[in-house]
Amino acid sequence: MAGRHNVRNGIDKELLAEIKQKLEQGLFPQWMVTDPDIYDLEVDKIFGRTWQYLGHESELKEAGDYVTRWLMDDPVLLVKNKKGEINVFLNSCSHRGTHLCTADVGNRKTFTCPFHGWSFNTDGELIGVVAGDKVFGERLNKQDWNLHKIPRVDTYRGMIFGNLDPNAMPLEDYLGDLKWYIDLFLARSDGGMEVIGAPQRWVVNTNWKMSTENFGGDPYHVATTHKSTVELGISPKDPFYASYGHQVKLNHGHCVNVSTTGPGFSVPSYQGLPEEMWPMFERNLSKEQLEVYKQTVVIVGTCFPNLSFHCPVHGNEGHLHNYLTLRIWRPIGPDKIEIWAWFLIDKAAPEEYKMQSYKGYVASFGPSGTLEADDTEIWTRVAKASKGKMARNREMKYNNVLNYMMGMDKIEPDESWPGPGIAYPTCFVDYALRGMHEYWLELLTKEYEDEQ
Amino acid sequence: MNSEIYYEITRFLTREARLLDDRKFEEWLALFADDIVYRMPVRVTRESKDRTGKDNAMTYFEESKISLTTRVKRLRTSSAWAEDPPLHTRHFVSNIDVEDCEHPDEYKVVSYFLTKRSRGVDHEAEQIFGERHDVLRRVNGEWKIHSRTIYPDQSVLTVMNLSMFL
Ligand code: FES
Ligand SMILES: [Fe+2]
C-alpha cells in the first residue's frame, strides 16, 4: 500500500498499530492465531530474542552426561564437563554442519562427528582432525573451529535457559517478578526440585500461543474442558472452583495464577505436602511468600513465550498429591507444536511421596492425562477454526476478533496482595493474557525502526 | 506350550482389539486381573552402546485396575472431548510370540501393535506403533492379562493424546 512502511510479508507498522488498538479493547484479531507471516516474525523477534528453557540441571549428573534439545529449530547439546559445569552448544559440527549428536541422552568424553571424524571434548574444543596436518596443513587453527556456543546461557534455580540474542537482558532481569512465584515451588525445599525420568513428548496440531495462553491465564476453561473429571467426582462441582485465588500480571508477558480453595473443597496447607517438609518451607521462603504459599492449591502459569509450569494438587485413586510439571510448547510451524513435559518433585520429599506424585501426574497430565487429553483436543479445534478466509481477514471485516475482555473495567487489583506484580482477586479475568499480548506485540513491533 | 494354547492366546488378543475398536471398554476392562500392572514407558533415543531406550523411569501410562477403571468411566461421561465425537480406531495386533512361564498356567506374550485413529473429518490418520509385553494367565479356563508393558517405537508420539488404550 502506498505510503505504508513495509515491515515484512505484508505486515507493516500501521497494521501492527491497528492490532494494538484492538488489544487495548481486549480483542485479539483471529487472523493472527495461525498466520504464517506472523509466525515468521515470531520466530525472529520472539524466539530469537527471549530466554528459552532448555532443561534442568538434575538431568545432567555425572561428567560427560549430555542431553540434546531444540531451541525452536536449532539443535542444542547440553553437556557436563569435567569441572561439573554445563556447556551449551549448537549441536552441529563446525566442519560441515552435520547434526553432531543425535541421541536424546547419554554420556561421552568426546563427540566424534560421523561425517569426517572431527572430534570435540565436553568443552566443545576441537581436539581431533582426521589427517589434520596432512590435509589442512598450517591453515587450520583448531581453536577457531570449536563447537559454537549458544550466545547466552544462564540458570535459575536449576532451570537452564539459552538465548540467541547476545544483547538480551540478563535472565535474572527477564524473569523479574516471576522469580517470587516460581520460587514457591522451585525454592521451597532444601535442594530444590529434580526431574524424574525423561520428558514426555508428543505433537499437537495447534499454534504455540494456544497452549501458552492456556497455562498462562485460562482457569476459566477448567470447569467446561475438564468437566469429565467433575462428573467423575475428582474435581469439585462448583463451576467457580478454578476462580478462587489470584491472577497475577507480571512484566515481560509472564503470567501466574495462584489458586486457593473455595467453599466446599479443602486441601491441607502447603499443597498437602507431607508435614515433615513444612519446616523447610518456613526456612526457605520469605514471610510474604509463606503467607501466600500456605493457602495455595495450584500454581499455574507461563514464562513468556513458551515455558509453562503447573504445580497442582491432583489425585490418583482418590489420593491427592502435589508435583511440578514444566513444559515447553516448541513451535514446529504456525499450526504445530511439539510438547516437552517434564515431571519434577522435591529432592527432599519422602521416596514414597515421590512415587505417588508421579502416579498422580501420569493420571492427570501428559498425553494420557485425564485432564490434558481434552486440552489438546480443544487447542487443535481453535487452530482448525482459525485458518479460513473469514477468520484470516486482516481488515477484520467479519468482526473476526477473539474475546479477552473478562474482568475488564470490572475487577480492580488487590492492593493487599503480598507478592509482586498486579494481582487480581480472582482467576476468572483476562488481565494476565492481555499483558502477554501486549508484550508479544511490543516484541513484534520493536526495532521496527532499525530495519528501515 | 502347544498349538492349542497359541491359538487361544491369539484369539484372545484379537478379541481384545475388537472390544477396543467397538468401544466396549467395560468388557475390555474385564479381561484384566484385579492386580494388573499396566505401563507404557517413555521411549528415549539412545546411542547404540546404551541399547534400546526402553528402560525409563517416566511413563505415558502407570495404571492399576482402579485407575484404568477411572479412565474407562471418564470415556462414559458427557464431556470427554478428546473422544467426543468418538475417534474411529483400529487396533492391529500381530507377530504374537508366546513363551512358557514358571507358573504352568501363565504365559509371556510379546505382540506388535499398530493403532490407527481417524479423528472427525481429518484427512490424515494418526498412528502409534510398537510392542507389548504381556503376562497372560488362565484361571478356570478363563484368560486374564496380569501385566502389560507397552513400548512405543516413537520417541515423540505423533498422536495428540492417548485418550485410547493400547
Ligand atoms: S561435518 Fe563433521 S567432520 Fe565434517
Ligand atoms: Fe486444561
Image (cartoon, grey):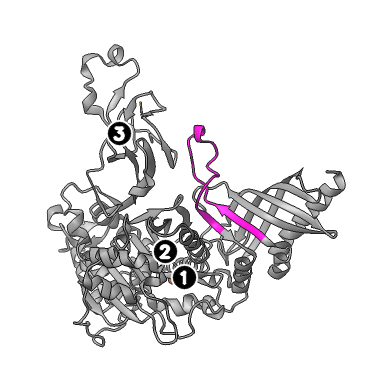
Q: Quadrant of residue B118?
A: bottom right
Question: Which residue was labeled with disc 1?
Answer: A314
In magenta stretch: residue B44 = yes
Question: Which residue was labeled with disc 2?
Answer: A323
Query: Residue A431, position in %: x, y?
Result: 27, 77
- Front-lying residue, B125 or B62: B62
Please tell me which of labels 1 and 3 falls first in the chain: 3
Question: Which residue was labeled with disc 3?
Answer: A82
Query: Residue A389, position in %: x, y?
Result: 40, 69
Residue type of the residue flagged with mark 1: His
- Circle 1 — which element? strand
Number of residue marks: 3
Pointer 1 with pointer 2, Cβ within 8 A: yes
Query: Residue A52, position in %: x, y?
Result: 29, 53
Same-chain check, marks 3 and 2: yes
Q: Chain of mark 1?
A: A
**Label 1 to label 2, Cα distance in Å?**
8 Å
Query: Residue A395, position in %: x, y?
Result: 29, 72
Q: Residue at x 50, y 35 (%)?
A: B50
Q: Chain of mark 3?
A: A
Residue type of the residue flagged with mark 2: Tyr
Q: Point out the residue furthest to the top here.
A: A134
Please tell me which of labels 3 and 2 falls first in the chain: 3
